Image: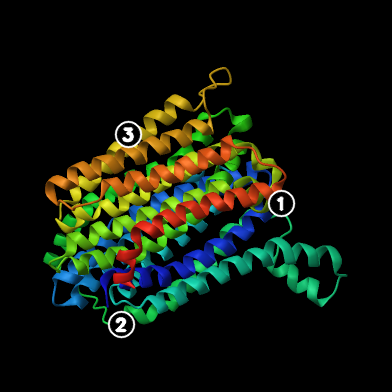
Amino acid sequence: MNPLKRLAGQTAVYGLPSILGRILGYLLVPLYTRVFWPGDYGTVNVFYAYASFLMVILTYGMETAFFRFNEAEENKEKVFSAGMISLVVSSLVFLFVTSVFAQPVARWIDYPDHKEYVIWFAWMLSLDALSAIPFARLRSQNKARRFATIKFINIFINIGLNLFFLLLCPYLVNHLKEGPVTKILHLVYRSDWRIEYIFISNLIASAATLILLIPQYSGLRWQIDKKLWRRMIIYAFPLLFAGMAGMVNETFDRLLLRYLLPENIASYQVGIYSACYKISILMTIFIQAYKYAAEPFFFAQAKEKDAKMVYAKIMDYFIITVSLIFLATMLYLNDFIMRVLVGKHYWEGKGVIPILMMANLFLGVYYNLSIWYKLTSKTLWGAWLSVIGAVITLSLNFWWIPLSPDHLIYGYLGSAWATFICYGAMMVLSYLIGQKYFPVPYNLMKFFGYLGLSVLLYVISVLVTVEPAILRITFHTLLLLVFAGVAWRIEKPGLAKVF
């Protein structure tokens, strides 16, 4: 099969659980943003920001190391066992230490009355860490359908439990008379819990996922090849720092908003910013699905003579897709997306959405470019690039987030611009350095052309006022078709060869 066609197919399969999960999960956002005030929703996002950061530490680059050595080593069971035993030991240590010191940790993160949150997240993160390499093994074996099935089950359990605890149980408690059903209900439901059920639902889904992945543990030998493990750690260690710095770039703005803004508005502002951040759903869904398929694909394709030409062509199609996603989201933002997906209390933050959409587009391009240091085993460069991004993120957030009530500069708007500048800088630096060590003939004319066209059409939609709504939507649809038509006209010959 044509390699580009294979990558497109695998991206679609890996994307199905991501797309459905994000869509179904996003159906909860209208619920959350209508049931919870921004302050409560901000608390949820603060904990998930911590979780994202800790997840990188708990997996410490072992997924990518698994892909790298799984391709290079003949004994694949040894590679799997080395990576898996390493994660089992580290996860158990983390779980024990966090559980013992849950109260001090809760005080340190400024939630002293909720040490149970700390314990729940310790279990959730440990379970997810133990699922990481089994999922990676499925990807390396091209078992995309099984991968997708397990992801689907995780999604349905998580969302189903959210709906059960947040909608069905309160309804039954308020409408049923006392009897056998209500007695059973009181055994599993506490009316004084609200956001707690978001965390519990996720924890149960993580446990179910690990159980479903048990067959992937076949071939695991509880005897580690120490020399192989050391080589994997040396390869993965820079990726740990890259991942940590990457999580600083992706999630630390919410934590800094929580702790740098005045206390009376901090959680409220985090809630608004987080809800608007989620509007970039289509961009992040595509990038996540693409990453799942692309990483094993790039390693496997590296053996081919025309690998660099394939990587360059993939970048062309990637830029077209993310530019189209950016344009479609922005054209229909006010008429559909904000009205359907986000409660009115959160609309004041919509000014950050185009900034964050473009920032995530830069991040997607960076992921594409980053293959050079993984293929050349120069993973230390990945760490340095992410650290540079983290320095930019932290510096600009400390500068632009208010430190006191009379020092208001940009607030969460500053966080959005910091994200934009961070990912833009990482993208440019990765391209420049990568061309020195692993030159790929990327078509910069297409990059700037498609990206510039999408921004130009968006600016036209803002400057040209069209009323009533039906005419405005028609006009915006025509702008979207202009972009699609231009891309089709330019890429049609190449696409015909691929498909």
Residue position marked by numbered label 1 in the rendering: 35
Instruction: Tell me if 224 is positioned left or right of 271 in this view.
Output: left
The residue shown at (52%, 27%) is 410
Circle on res. 218: 2
87 or 149: nearer the eye? 149
SS class, disc 3: helix
Neighbor class of circle 3 (other Cα within 10 Å; few <14, some 14-19, many 20+) is some
Q: CA distance from mark 3 to mark 2?
A: 42 Å
**Coordinates of residue 335 in the picture (x, y in percent):** 66, 48
Q: Is residue 58 visible?
A: yes
Q: Please name whichever residue, 85 or 172, is drawn nearer the observer in this view of the structure.
A: 172
Q: Which three-letter amino acid code belongs to the residue tagged 3?
A: Val
Give x and y (percent) for residue 481: 51, 55
Cα separation between marks 3 and 1: 36 Å
Location of residue 377 by image quarter: bottom left
Q: Amino acid at mark 1?
A: Val
Q: Earlier in the sequence, mark 2 or mark 1?
A: 1
Residue 464 lies, in percent from the top left, at 60, 37
Q: Residue at the spot x=24%, y=64% of the render? A: 298
The C terminus, quarter of image: bottom left
Q: Is residue 189 above or below residue 55?
A: below
What is the secondary structure assignment of the residue under circle 2?
A: loop
Q: Which residue is mark 3?
A: 391
